[in-house]
Image (tube, helix red, strand yellow):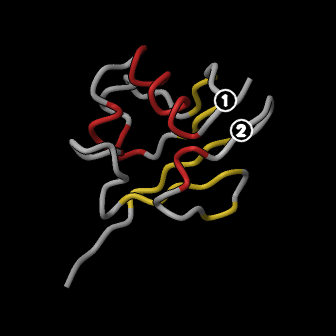
Amino acid sequence: MPKVAVPPPYRGPTKGEAQIDVAGHTILECIEAVDARYPGFRAQVLDEEGRVRRFVRLFLNGEALEPTALERAVADGDEVGVLAAIAGG
């Protein structure tokens, strides 16, 4: 089973959970599986059109992914990482 690593800024919907085991075959399915259990998570990661939000970065087993990689396959034991990229000035 893949797992999703949730950064502290996005743990509100997950009630503090940092690692969530999910059933999914793609990055998108994993994000949606978290949202099915913890409504509101998807909206933090993806915009209304289903694209990765501007200040969110996704990783697969520590490898940075392009924002268009939502259909990338995941396997049992893989970790989908979500990083809240902070901008400031």
Which residue: 41% across, 28% down? 16
Q: Is residue 73 left or right of residue 65?
A: right
Q: Which residue is mark 2?
A: 74
What SS does tag 1 mark? loop
- Which of the pair 22/50 is nearer the observer? 50
Which residue: 53% across, 29% down? 29
Q: Which residue is mark 1?
A: 25
- Which of the pair 81/29 is nearer the observer? 29
At label 1, which amino acid type do we have?
His
Relative image position of residue 2 (x, y in whole percent)? 70, 30
Asked where in the image residue 88 lies, by quadrant, the reply is bottom left
> Badges 2 and 1: C-beta atoms under 8 Å apart?
yes
Instruction: Give the mark nearest the N terminus, 2 or 1.
Output: 1
Query: Can you tell which mark lies on residue 65?
Result: none
Category of crowding for the residue at label 2, using alpha-carbon neighbours closer than 10 angstroms: few (below 14), some (14–19), many (at least 20): many
What SS does tag 2 mark? loop
Relative image position of residue 41 (x, y in whole percent)? 34, 32
Which residue: 61% across, 22% down? 22
Q: Quadrant of the N terminus?
A: top right
Q: Quadrant of the C terminus?
A: bottom left
